[in-house]
Amino acid sequence: MKDFDSSNVSAFKDVWVFCEQREGKLMPTDFELISEARRLADELGVQLVGLLLGDNVEGLAKELGGYGADKVIVADDPVLKVYTTDAYAKVICDVIADKKPEIFLIGATNIGRDLGPRCAARLHTGLCADCTHLDVDMDIYKDFLSNNSVLAPERIAGLGTARVLGEPHDVSKDLKMTRPAFGGNLMASIICPRFRPSMATVRPGVLKKKPFDQAKADACVIEKVEVNVAPEDLKTEVIDVVKAAKKLVDLVGAEYIVSVGRGIAADVEGGIKIAEDLAAALGGGVVGGSRAAIDSGWLSADHQVGQTGKTVHPKVYIALGISGAIQHKAGMQESELIIAVNKNEAAPIFEIADYGITGDLFKVGPLLTEAINEYKANK
Ligand SMILES: Cc1cc2nc3c(=O)[nH]c(=O)nc-3n(C[C@H](O)[C@H](O)[C@H](O)COP(=O)(O)OP(=O)(O)OC[C@H]3O[C@@H](n4cnc5c(N)ncnc54)[C@H](O)[C@@H]3O)c2cc1C
């Protein structure tokens, strides 16, 4: 690390993704990030490299190739069996200092949110946390702005330089990292022009995983690196791992989600039961909630959908008694089909709903369940 100079921007090359595993199982965010990073690597004409740490994890590496990684660097050592910030940050910073990737992406999981800032600080570079969109190519970025922002077309067309330390700077090769800012009321695109790697954490569930390709998995190169973690590098020792007794709801992986909002206030238990029944009728669906439902203590925090909750894109998302605040929409508007039930016909949720039902959720919810069950019985 001694001679590492993050400001020597031209010395850096390739796109890297930190591939998180827990107990020998890759996380869904790995596949999402690798799929999207493939596009970024192609735009830059460089290699896409996965970085995998753990104990006895080499066998997992090829799968990452199936989603687009050209190469996977594996740091395999018993000291990396259970995640600790000290050991993981040390190994990652060592290998980055040695190989110098220009972009380094991390999933914004609990581990990623801990690891990302630590590595960025140690490498003396910038990190944009909790991104929801990434671009390198200017034309693709401009298309994204045209379709997702209220910027005037001439403003978008004129983009290409930024002022950095008073000098004009060409941003065409920089990673444009977009994330919600100011309570979700605006989107900010951030670049890291003076230092490398450009680092970003990306929210789980936001990026789409590409189909798995066995031929690419077979072609993926595995490179093992040495792990140098001395006892004095470790300031913490994991004595025991205690798992939460309660199983958390898997919103991100769910195909059907029925969410409830403050609209169930008149009968909270009844409202949640209606959502559970509807989710079950849809076939293994799960119950989500708006922040109002979580803050009221009606559902636990793992059920929250939205900017400060989970980002989901299920096949069907049903919103019962949810107004559709921008922070809620930010987490669910990419769902394949959105059905909203609200007694206020002017509720903003209807702006993004494919089907909107103006009515009382306590009446409409059971009718929907009944109709689905009837349809299934007749089929
Ligand atoms: C920084 C920040 C982050 C945030 N993050 C999130 C987030 O991650 N997720 C999130 O959801 N919110 C988030 N919020 C809060 C968000 O702004 C809204 O306050 C919240 O989403 C409102 O929840 P709601 O729609 O359930 O409640 P309300 O806005 O009160 O809406 C309740 C709706 O229920 C309808 N209704 C009432 N009774 C019935 C009935 N019987 N049948 C049918 N409809 C009925 C009403 O017409 C109304 O539209 C965040 C806010 C901030 C400032």
Image (cartoon, helix red, strand yellow):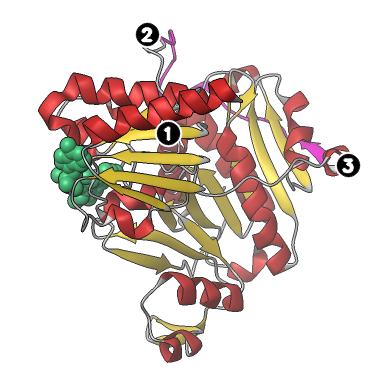
- Looking at the image, which is closer to me, 322 or 282? 282
User: Residue 269: percent from the left, percent from the top?
Assistant: 20, 19
Secondary structure under the numbered disc 2 in the rendered image: loop
Task: Choose the circle earlier in sequence order: 1 or 3.
Answer: 3
Q: Which mark is residue 245?
A: 2
Left or right? Give the position of 315 relative to 209: left
Q: Measuring 48% from the left and 53% from the top, which residue is drawn there? A: 200
**How busy is the neighbourhood of tag 2: few (under 14 within 10 Å), some, or many (20 plus)?**
few
Nearer the camera: disc 1 or disc 3: 1
Label 1 to label 2: alpha-carbon separation? 23 Å
Amino acid of disc 2: Ala
Of residues 109 and 227, the one nearer the viewer is 109
Quadrant of the snapshot with the C terminus = top right
Q: Magenta stretch: residue 239 in it?
A: yes
Ligand 1 visible in quadrant: top left
Which secondary structure lies at badge 3?
helix
Q: Which residue is mark 3?
A: 215
Instruction: Name the residue that disc number 1 marks.
Output: 257
Where is 26 relative to 120, above or below? Answer: above
Q: CA distance from mark 1 to mark 3?
A: 34 Å
Residues packed near mark 3 inside 10 Å, few (<14), some (14 to 19) or many (20 plus)? few
Read off the magenta span: 221-242
Which badge, 1 or 2, is on the more N-terminal residue? 2
- For discs 1 and 2, the disc positioned in front in the rendered view: 1
- Is 293 rendered above or below residue 239? below
Does the numbered disc 3 mark a residue whose Cβ is under 8 Å from ligand 1?
no
